[in-house]
Image (tube, rainbow, N blue to C red):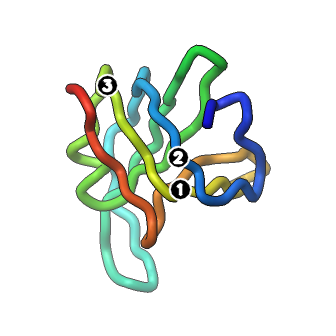
Amino acid sequence: MKIAELKNNSRKVDIEAKVIEKEEPRDVNTRYGKTKVANAKIEDDTGTFTLVLWGEQAENVLEGSIIKIENGYVSLWNDEPQLSVGKFGKLTIVKE
């Protein structure tokens, strides 16, 4: 799948992209307890998209990394679509 194909409510997203920007991780309180979250901008040859990194991913994924996401999903946050890995997805750092 390519970034240009992503839209709200896309499910079972398998994509490989480069992290071109990443915010500093921040602490948030969720119903599961305290964790880290960071927004990142990813790109491929078709465009850019916002990726939300949770927990260890917020710390481990770096700008410039090539990542692979399996079984991700797209949802709206403040009327902006964003890609998340979620509980059933997987994020792999292909190249740092």
Q: Residue drawn 58% across and 14% down?
A: 45
Could you tell me residue 89's position as x and y percent? Answer: 44, 62
In this figure, which residue is indicated by the disc labeled 2? 14
Residue depth check, mark 3 versus mark 1: number of the one nearer the observer = 1
Q: Marks 2 and 1: CB-CB under 8 Å?
A: yes
In front of the other: 9 or 14: 14
In front of the other: 55 or 92: 92
Name the disc covering residue 32, or none: none
In this figure, which residue is indicated by the disc labeled 1? 72
**Left or right: 50 in relation to 76:** left
Alpha carbons under labels 3 and 1: distance apart? 20 Å
Could you tell me residue 47's position as x and y percent? Answer: 64, 20
Please name the amino acid that badge 2 sits on: Asp
The quarter of the picture where residue 33 lies is bottom left
**Left or right: 40 in relation to 49:** left
Q: Work out whether mark 2 precedes mark 1 in sequence or the reverse, and give the earlier one.
A: 2
Could you tell me residue 69's position as x and y percent? Answer: 44, 46
Please name the amino acid that badge 1 sits on: Gly
For label 3, count other residues whose C-alpha is less than 10 Å away and answer few (under 14), some (14-19) or many (20+): some
Q: Residue drawn 40% across and 50% down?
A: 53
In this figure, which residue is indicated by the disc labeled 3? 63
**Left or right: 17 in relation to 66:** right
Alpha carbons under labels 2 and 3: distance apart? 20 Å
Q: Secondary structure at mark 2?
A: strand
Please name the amino acid that badge 3 sits on: Glu
Alpha carbons under labels 2 and 1: distance apart? 7 Å
Q: Secondary structure at mark 3?
A: loop
**Left or right: 62 in relation to 40:** left
Q: Secondary structure at mark 1?
A: strand
Residue depth check, mark 2 versus mark 1: number of the one nearer the observer = 2
Q: Work out whether mark 2 precedes mark 3 in sequence or the reverse, and give the earlier one.
A: 2
